[in-house]
Image (tube, rainbow, N blue to C red):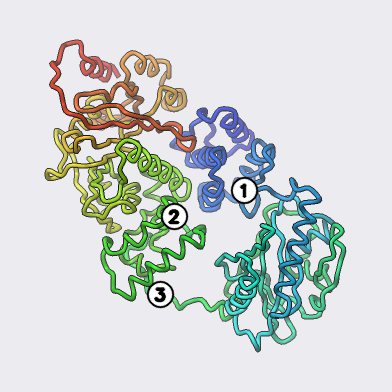
Amino acid sequence: MADGWDRGWVADRVQGLVADPSGWVADPEVPWQGVVETETRLVLAGDHDAAYHGLRETRELSDEQKKELIELINSLYLLDRELEWTNHGILRSFRFWSRGEKVEYLHAANGLAEVLEGIGSEVLIGFGSVLAYVRDQDFIPHDDDLDLIVAFDATEVGSLTEALDLVVVALQKAGCEVWGDLPTHRKASSGSGHVIDVFVGLIEDGRVSWFPSARGGLSVEQVFPGQTVDFLGVPVRMPARPHEYLEVTYGPDWATPIGNWNHPWDRSQYADLLNEPAAVPPLPVAAPDQPPRRPVLMMSGKRILKRAERLCISEGLELPEQVLPHLRRLSVDEFGEFMWSLPNPDFPALSAILPAMAPPSVQQGWTGSSGTPLLAQTTSFVRSVESTYANHTGQSLQGKTILDVGVGYGRLIRLMYRYSNPDQLWGVDAWDRSLQHCRDVGLPANLRQSEVFPVALPVGGTTFDLAYAFSVFTHLSPRAAEAVLDAVRKSMKPGGLFIVTVRPIEFWKHLAPAKGIDPAELRAQHQANGFAYLPHEGIEGESYGDASVVPSFFRRPGWKLVGRDWNAIDPYQAVLVLQAEPIQEVAATPGTRLSRLRRAARRR
């Protein structure tokens, strides 16, 4: 097992997961291995956005290690599928385009340039598109889009924001679809379906600038008037002195291909031109080690959030139950992305009402993952819960009473706000430290500490339509698991669902060697008793360790096993669906499964 980064070792693990997604599981005590496993599984599951943003965000790998992991995933999986992990994401890069497709794309860019003629300077191809023509005489293989540039006289247009507004109006009048929220450019698509980036710049005192390039780095004469060149048989307009343009834009080594090159993005040079809002007062309950927020929500989701933000201000909304109805139009992933981003400086009013996300150190400590990879795992489970509840009850989760068993720092219960208000949400946990993390960020819900071996839950007689326990029965001893099952059943409504995750027998071949245990012994225990348990050291091991469980374990009085689910993002968290039914008294006998399980636990 590798503790330090080794490219060959990582390549073997990536290749192994490509061949068998149920294969290798990272050592939980080596965080960078968890990143390699999570990123690879996200790519295999087709969740490319989560993989892309998760790797950008993680602090467990250096930039060089991230680059190597990308190269390995590309070479071992993506390139064979005509996809490539590039600086813009995981997509079908130009190396897979035919000449005919490229020619069609150039004509689409010319069409968009015609739409924009007359609103500012002449419209030219720019940035990587110029580099493609001059250096490669073809599209750059690892790139995926064309760029247009247009400039405005700073004496007439006072900011980049104003310039972007002029571009958007012109494009929309021509029937183009326009989107994006970066201060540099907008994405646009006409009827052809091709997407082109349109960058705006300003002309100031004989100099012209396009953020994120250096302000004033180019003279007007280096760019205008443009020249017409033949690019793959298509006439296109580009800067007057393309070699000088490239040296200013990309530096003196512009002729050397660099797959993941980035602009410096120095906003301070353009602060007076960006029209950014004044700084807002510090938000309450801020998480000091929260990673930078990822701008991945699309415009449709942001419209919902902006409307809710305006309502908070105009109508004086102050309580979660006043705000949440306006946010439930978001999809599960949009809702999760927003909750993960809190406190969010773009939405200070909402951030003052809703709980901050736990810091990455807490996320990592409780779940072995954080940020986008953890969000992907979380939303995958929530979607499974939502669809499972509808399939088995014929009802929506909206307005239901919901119980989070093993609530931890509140990772999952945050997403339950999408369905019910805080007064209908309950979270129980045997560890007060978990509940303290919920209290630290002001998480609104009914939170209670339960017993390690509960006879009943401390919920004051409340009964639930839905309960769930994610990664709880994966750790409980047989005695604790049975106690939790029986206690939860006493608080369920007739026909209510209890959705749990368990580890299959295959889990032991990965964990046991890392713990110095023979996996054959645990597999034999699993096969003989339907439950294998590896306790933690000390008194904690009486109730908590690592466990694998067969589905039939849950066929207990008051419970009916009605379904299962599985997903490739988290293959060792198999989902089981239990439904509450009338409890039939069953006489205990010396040979019952309970006796066998307890004997097995004592042997461990």
The amino acid type found where label 1 is placed reads Ile
Depicted 318 relative to depicted 294: above or below: below
Q: Which callout, 1 or 2, points to the residue nearer the camera?
A: 2
Q: Is residue 185 left or right of residue 604?
A: right
Q: Residue, x 20% and y 14% (percent of image)?
A: 592
Q: Residue, x 31% and y 51% (percent of image)?
A: 419
Crowding at dot 2, Cα within 10 Å, few <14 / some 14-19 / many 20+, comes out as many
Measured from the top left, where is residue 82 in percent x and y?
Answer: 69, 42
Residue beneath label 3, please? 280
Measured from the top left, where is residue 596 in percent x and y?
Answer: 24, 15
| Helix, strand or loop for disc 1 | strand
Could you say which disc has been placed on residue 90 in the image?
1
Q: Rounded to the nearest whole Å, what is the CA distance between mark 3 and mark 1?
A: 35 Å
Q: Is residue 475 left or right of residue 512?
A: left
Q: Which callout, 2 or 3, points to the residue nearer the camera?
A: 2
Of labels 1 and 2, earlier in sequence is 1
The amino acid type found where label 3 is placed reads Val
Measured from the top left, where is residue 50 in percent x and y?
Answer: 52, 48
Q: Which callout, 3 or 1, points to the residue nearer the camera?
A: 1
The amino acid type found where label 2 is placed reads Glu
| Helix, strand or loop for disc 3 | loop
Of labels 3 and 1, earlier in sequence is 1
Residue beneath label 2, please? 334
Q: Is residue 126 left or right of residue 437?
A: right
Depicted 475 relative to depicted 376: above or below: above
Extreme residue in the top direction: 591
Q: Residue, x 46% and y 35% (percent of image)?
A: 567
Crowding at dot 3, Cα within 10 Å, few <14 / some 14-19 / many 20+, comes out as few
